[in-house]
Amino acid sequence: IVSAVSKTITGLGGNIDACSQTVLANYFTLIIVVSFPQPAEAEALCRAVRDGAPRLQLQVQVRPFEPARVAPVETGESFVVTAFGPDREGIILRFSSYLGSKGINITDLYGTLRGEQFVLIGQVSMPPTWDIQMLQTDLEQLAHDAGYTVRLQHENVFVATNQLRLPAARTVAKR
């Protein structure tokens, strides 16, 4: 699907500036920000993407990007919150409400049920005024009350400790 959509966009002279793709409950979702040298007509673009992969029966929606309508978000450092525990109603509400009440912006969120366990991973933008140790303590208490385990890590630490490590390539000396 990504290949078919990318081929159509590129064939129309467009450039994909940003994208996010996921599969949730067997539903494929792709969100892309596309730029064109000249303005593109929304319905024609929808039709072209659908026609570019007719056997996939894609549902396509196009909206113009309007930066002026986007509310400014306080920028801060990026952290990753991971939480897991028994599946129970309202767990996403519990964590998102807490973070929102502290002015912490959730920039990416993934949650899934794995057997009896619910796993939640969120990337958050932390205002620079926050005390990280105090926030970790608050999150641990919130998690404990729900029977969850939670961890807050700076994005750089999360990436460094969770990267796929490939074996070092062997070099062959030329003779």
Image: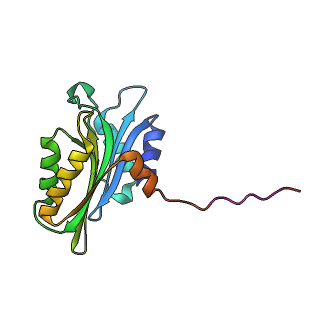
The stretch in magenta equals: 168-173
Q: What residue is drawn where x is 37% and y is 46%? A: 155
| Residue 13 at x, y percent in the picture | 46, 34
The verdict on residue 171 being magenta is yes
Observer-nearest residue: 30 or 92? 92
Side (left or right) of 148 relative to 53: left
| Residue 38 at x, y percent in the picture | 40, 25
| Residue 146 at x, y percent in the picture | 13, 63
**What type of secondary structure mainly makes up the magenta span?**
loop
Observer-nearest residue: 137 or 37? 137
Side (left or right) of 36 relative to 145: right
Looking at the image, which residue sits at the far right?
175
Asked which quadrant contains residue 61, the reply is top left
Asked which quadrant contains residue 169, the reply is bottom right
The color scheme shown is rainbow
The verdict on residue 102 being magenta is no
Asked which quadrant contains residue 77, the reply is top left
- The quarter in which the N terminus is drawn is bottom left
Q: What residue is drawn where x is 39% and y is 52%? A: 158
